[in-house]
Image: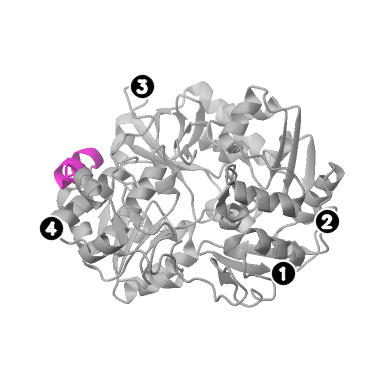
């Protein structure tokens, strides 16, 4: 996040897109509700009618995969009506003329044809956002999990800069992270092209500094992404894999291909707190400690580095992740020894510029937000206060591109995926809770009643959903939360794994798969399929 979570409550306008905030980030959603209660305007943009729509001043419901078009359309209105922040644009940005030229053709009427958003509603949303003294943008994976995910994020940055909303309290462009400490993992270099602190592996100065500290020669070539690693395993170019705290057998797209890739490995090690679908395939499982069983830090979505205190001992042979990793490294020939997590934090401060001023003693109470480069630095509430890290903010002229896969006669519906309040990610923890399973333990597909009527499908009926990659059976839930032509499934459920259907094609820059759009068909079950489904359900109940 460019800004802080508390900043949301000081916003005069909040634009939420690609985030079902009440279900996926319920604590942050309380800040949204408090801001709304205090008089802030709320714009919600989502392919589904999410709960926050009830509070929205404007709700736009675009066709999935058309985000660049509606963002360009909003900027078209703002520029043509002279609502942009001319002083900010002139003093703090560059390439505005390229942006203006690019969005000229995205009139609200043209955008309506692409997205399905009524032209007047788009105008209303643009005017509310542009005229607010402080406007914040909140987004999540509904924006990023597309082949155009990078373009979508750049477009939101364009919109924020156009109205002078970057580098101010109550404003910003704020991604809401999908998992705990995913921000911290990225900060620590858990990406294939950077060292800790986002220092490119191609940077000779960064390499030299780290080589001196660690006493090893470092590669200057970027590694592989998750999808690329699985592809290499499938082609037997990778023979062994070490998976830690990840469950690709449920979370990755085109699960049939994922399974084939993992089965092609000669050796698979999984380090996790439960025997996940992926761990069941492992040759060796390393039992890890859960969050309450270890010491260290988590870095949350607002860049706040927080202390984690061990509350109980790990059960059985489970150990803290850092201890396991250090022992493996040492046995493989690289001596990696620390007395405690505090020593690791001290090393992080040495190698990560943004963490340079952090230590366990400094973050003991409330944590600190990076950048915090020196021991006397107070941390940073919001980014880009006086200038951007590159100097001036760069506008990008971006054109709308359709999703990689669109509906046709054989697969006439658009499937989009997401989460529900009562489950988390692949359910490896939440599905072990009886209470949560009672509240949200069944897979479903949302389908518009008009589409269901055409297919002679009743509410609660088990149906077959098929894409070019596979099929699953799941209960139909008739609802107007989705528009005609669009269906929705959550991805938590192994027994109806939606990622058997999703498209593994990725964004060319970020390499994130297009989970949010693929073409499917929904069908009634045949008699034989109904019988088989009953048997499978009985077996699943017996197994649980």
Label 4 and label 3: CA atoms lie apart by: 44 Å
Range of magenta residues: 104-115
Q: Earlier in the sequence, mark 4 or mark 3?
A: 4
Q: Which residue is mark 4?
A: 81
Q: Earlier in the sequence, mark 3 or mark 2?
A: 2
Task: Give how far across and how far down residue 449 sits, in percent.
Answer: 31, 40
In the displayed structure, 132 sits above or below 514; it is below
Q: Earlier in the sequence, mark 2 or mark 1?
A: 1
Q: Report whether 211 appears left or right of 427.
A: right
Mark 4 vs mark 2, foreground winner is 2
Mark 4 vs mark 3, foreground winner is 4
Mark 3 packing: few (<14 Cα in 10 Å), some, or many (20+)?
few
Q: Which residue is mark 1?
A: 309
Whether tag 3 and tag 1 are in contact, CB under 8 A, the answer is: no
Mark 2 packing: few (<14 Cα in 10 Å), some, or many (20+)?
some
Q: Earlier in the sequence, mark 4 or mark 1?
A: 4
Q: Residue at x 52, y 24 (%)?
A: 529
Mark 2 vs mark 1, foreground winner is 2
Whether tag 2 and tag 1 are in contact, CB under 8 A, the answer is: no
- Of 480 and 274, which appears nearest the observer? 274
Label 4 and label 2: CA atoms lie apart by: 62 Å
Mark 3 vs mark 1, foreground winner is 1
Whether tag 4 and tag 2 are in contact, CB under 8 A, the answer is: no
In the displayed structure, 519 sits above or below 118; it is above
Q: Secondary structure at mark 4?
A: loop
Q: Report whether 11 appears left or right of 274.
A: left
Label 4 and label 1: CA atoms lie apart by: 54 Å
Q: Secondary structure at mark 1?
A: loop
Q: Which residue is mark 3?
A: 410
Q: Earlier in the sequence, mark 3 or mark 1?
A: 1
Q: Which residue is mark 2?
A: 337
């Amino acid at each position: 996040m460019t800004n802080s979570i508390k900043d949301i409550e000081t916003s005069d306008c909040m634009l939420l897109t690609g985030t079902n905030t009440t279900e996926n980030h319920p604590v942050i959603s309380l800040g949204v509700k408090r801001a709304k209660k205090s008089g802030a305007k709320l714009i919600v943009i989502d392919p589904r009618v999410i709960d926050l729509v009830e509070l929205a001043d404007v709700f736009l419901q675009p066709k999935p995969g058309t985000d660049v078009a509606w963002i360009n359309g909003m900027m078209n209105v703002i520029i043509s009506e002279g609502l942009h922040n001319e002083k900010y644009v002139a003093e703090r940005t560059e390439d505005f003329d390229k942006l203006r030229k690019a969005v000229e053709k995205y009139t609200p009427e043209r955008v309506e044809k692409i997205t399905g958003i009524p032209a007047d509603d788009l105008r209303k949303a643009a005017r509310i956002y542009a005229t607010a003294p402080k406007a914040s943008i909140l987004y999540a994976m509904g924006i990023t999990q597309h082949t155009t995910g990078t373009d979508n994020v750049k477009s939101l940055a364009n919109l924020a800069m156009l109205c002078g909303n970057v580098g101010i309290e109550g404003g910003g462009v704020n991604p809401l992270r999908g998992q705990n400490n995913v921000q911290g993992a990225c900060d620590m270099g858990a990406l294939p092209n950077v060292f800790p602190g986002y220092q490119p592996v191609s940077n000779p100065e960064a390499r030299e500094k780290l080589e001196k500290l660690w006493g090893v020669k470092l590669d200057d070539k970027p590694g592989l992404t998750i999808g690329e690693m699985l592809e290499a395993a499938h082609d037997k170019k990778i023979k062994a894999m070490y998976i830690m705290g990840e469950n690709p057998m449920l979370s990755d797209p085109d699960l049939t291909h994922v399974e084939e890739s993992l089965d092609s490995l000669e050796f698979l090690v999984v380090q996790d707190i439960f025997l996940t679908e992926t761990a069941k395939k492992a040759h060796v499982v390393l039992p890890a400690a859960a969050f309450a069983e270890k010491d260290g830090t988590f870095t949350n979505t607002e860049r706040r580095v927080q202390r984690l205190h061990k509350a109980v001992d790990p059960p059985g042979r489970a150990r803290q992740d850092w201890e396991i990793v250090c022992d493996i490294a040492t046995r493989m020939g690289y001596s990696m020894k620390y007395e405690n997590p505090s020593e690791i934090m001290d090393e992080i401060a040495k190698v990560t510029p943004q963490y340079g001023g952090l230590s366990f003693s400094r973050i003991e109470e409330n944590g600190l937000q990076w950048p915090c480069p020196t021991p006397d630095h107070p941390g940073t509430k919001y980014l880009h206060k006086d200038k951007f890290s590159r100097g001036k903010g760069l506008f990008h002229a971006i054109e709308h591109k359709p999703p990689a896969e669109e509906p046709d006669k054989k697969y006439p519906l658009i499937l989009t995926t997401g989460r529900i309040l009562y489950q988390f990610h692949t359910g490896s923890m939440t599905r072990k809770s009886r209470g949560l399973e009672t509240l949200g333990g069944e897979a479903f597909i949302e389908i518009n009643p008009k589409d269901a009527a055409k297919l002679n499908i009743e509410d609660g009926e088990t149906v077959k959903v098929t894409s070019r990659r596979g099929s699953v059976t799941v209960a139909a839930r008739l609802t107007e939360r989705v528009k005609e032509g669009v269906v929705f499934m959550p991805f938590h459920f192994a027994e109806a794994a939606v990622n058997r259907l999703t498209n593994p094609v990725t964004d060319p820059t970020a390499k994130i798969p297009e989970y949010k759009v693929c073409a499917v068909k929904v069908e009634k079950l045949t008699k034989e399929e109904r019988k088989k489904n009953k048997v499978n359900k009985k077996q699943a109940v017996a197994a649980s």
